[in-house]
Image (cartoon, rainbow, N blue to C red):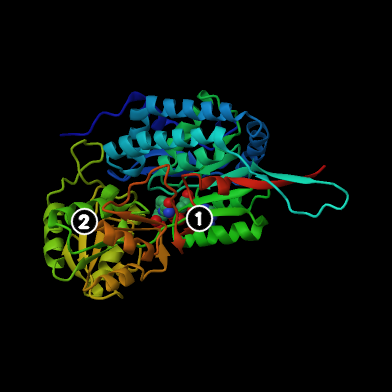
Amino acid sequence: MSNISLLPQVRGFLQREHSSFIDGRQQPADNPHYLEVIDPASDQVISRVAEACVHTVDDAVASSRRGFAQWSQAAPAVRASVLLKLADLIEQHREELAQLETCQSGKLINISRNFEVDQAAHFLRYYAGWATKLSGQTLTPSLPSFNGERYTAFTLREPVGVVVGIVPWNFSTMIALWKLGSALVTGCSIIIKPSEFTPLTILRIAELAIDAGLPAGALNVVTGGGMAGKALIEHPGTDKVSFTGSVPTGLAVGQSAMAANLTRTTLELGGKNAAGFLRDVALSKAVDGIIEAGFLHSGQICAAAERFYVHRSQIEAVTGALSERLAKLKIGSPLDETSEFGPVSNKQHQARLGALFAKARSENSQIIHGGRLLEGPGCYVEPTVILANSVNDSLLNEETFGPVATFLPYDDEEQLIALMNDSPYGLSASLWTNDLSKALRLVPQVQAGTVWVNMHTLLDPAVPFGGVKASGIGREFGGAFIEDYTELKSVMIRY
Ligand code: NAD
C-alpha cells in the first residue's frame, strides 16, 4: 500500500504562511521569526507559522477581554448551539483535519480520524450539554434573628474570565478542544497556545468556530513556543491557565501563574504510569493489554503505562510473547492506512528516546526487544521491551513518553501495589484480573487519579481525569471541570 493523497484544501492550507488568530482572523505577522512545522515522517518542512511577539500577546489578550464581555452574556442555549455547530463542522471537515494532524504530528491517519476528530467532536458535544445545566445552590443561613429579620442565600456560578489554554504536541487537536469546550461552555473566552511543533489544526478549527457563529475574540490562537506561553500566563489581562504538558514545564507554569497575579491554574502533567497484571490473566489477554496500555500512538499519551508489573512466574512468557507481537507490527508512513506503527512526533523527542536507550544499556537493563532508532528519513523508533534489574533502573523512573514498556517481576499482591505506588507521579494506573472482587479491594490502594480495570488509556468525557501527586492539579471532564472554569459567588439577602 502507499500513502493516501492529500486533499487540495490540505495542500493549500500547508502552503499558506500562518500567524496568530486574533479577532476572527489570522493577523499579519509583526515578527520576522517563523516556526517551521516539520513532518516527522519525512523530516520535510511542510508549513511556516509566525512566532507571536509581545505585541501579539497584548493584542490577543485585549481581543479576548472583548470576547469575554460579549460571550459571557450569551444565553446558555446559544452557547450550546454554537458548540454543537462547531462539532458538526469538525466532523464535516474530518478528512481535512485528520490529514493536517497526521502531517504535523506523524500520528497514524486512522488515529487522527478516530481520536483527533471523531472523539474530539464527541467531547465537544458533551461539553455543549453542560451549558444549560450550570447551576448554583439555595442555602438557608442560621444567623440569629433579633427583630424578626430573616435571611436567605444562594450561590451563582460565574465564568472565571479569559483562559489561557496551553497545549502539548501529542494530541494537539483533541486537547485544544477539551480546553476550548470547557472554557466556552462556561462563558469564558480562551486563548489557545498550541505546541510549537503542532500549531496547524487549531488554526483551522478557529476558522470553523467563526463559521459556527462564535463571536470574534471568544477564541484566539497565539502561535509560538514557551516564551509566548509565559507572556500569556504573566499577562495581567488573563484570569486562568489550563496547562497540559510535562512535569518540569508544569512546575514553571504554576510558579509563573502564582507569582503573576495568583492566577488560577490547572495542571495536567505527565508521569510514569503503572499497569499490574495479576496471576489469573491469560497470556494473550496480558499481551493485548500491554499493547493497549503502552503502545497506542507509540506511547505518546500522558495516560499510557510505562511500568509493567507481572508475576515472577510469568514474566518471561509475557515479555517473550509481547516481543513476538511487536516484531510483526508494520512500521511505516502514517499516511499509509496499512501502517500499524508510525514515527514519534519530532526529532528532539526521537533523540531523547535514543539517549534513554543508551542509559538503559549503560545500567545493564535487559533490552528484550527494540531499543534502537531507525535510520532516517523520519523520526522512527523501534517499539521496545525492557526488563529492569531493580526499582532503581532509570527506565522505571523517567517518563519516556514513547513506545517503551519496562517490566519488573513481583512476588505477591502486597508487593505489586507497593511497586505500583513507588513513584512521585500518579496520573493513571491499571489492574488486570478476572477476579472483580480482588480488583475492587485493590483499587482504593492504588495512588492515581484514574484506575482502570482490564483496560487502560481510554478516556471518556463523562469520567473526570487528572493527576494526583506530581501529575497535576485539577480535573478535566465530567462535572468536575466546572469547578476550575467558574468562580462561586455567594449572595446573602436580609428581608
Ligand atoms: P511541554 O511541557 O514541553 O510543552 C507543553 C506546552 O507548554 C507547549 O505548548 C509549550 O510551548 C509550552 N511551554 C513550554 N515552556 C513554557 C513556559 N515556560 N510557559 C508556558 N508555556 C510553556 O510538553 P510536550 O513535550 O509538548 O508534551 C509532552 C508532555 O505532556 C509529556 O510529559 C506528557 O506526559 C504530557 N501530557 C500530559 C497530559 C495530561 O492530560 N496529563 C496530556 C498530554 C500530554
Identified at 32% across, 26% down, the residue is 7
Nearer-N-terminus badge (2/1): 1
Question: Which quadrant of the view contains residue 440?
Answer: bottom left
| Residue depicted at x 27% and y 41% | 108
Which amino acid does the dot numbered 2 rest on? Asn
Question: Mark 1 Cα within 10 Å, few/some/many (few <14, many 20+)?
Answer: many
> Of residues 234 and 325, which is closer to you in this image?
325
Q: Is residue 296 left or right of residue 133?
A: left
- Whole-percent x and y of residue 250? 50, 58
Residue 249 position in % (x across, y down)? 49, 59
| In this view, 383 is above or below 153 | below
Residue 47, how many percent across, how many down?
Answer: 40, 37
Up/down of 317 relative to 374, above or below: below
Observer-nearest residue: 427 or 464? 464
> Where residue 267 is drawn, which disc sits there?
1
- Work out which quarter of the rendered image holds the N terminus and state it: top left
> What x and y, as percent, mark residue 309?
24, 66
Task: Label 1: state its secondary structure.
Answer: strand
Work out how far the residue at label 2 is from the one at label 1, CA to CA, in angstroms: 34 Å
Q: Which mark is residue 381?
A: none
Relative to 180, say whether 11 is above or below.
above
The C terminus, quarter of image = top right
Residue 48 lies left or right of residue 152; in this view the side is left
The residue that appears at 31% across and 71% down in the rendered structure is 419
Mark 1 is on which residue type? Answer: Leu
**Residue 434 badge:** 2
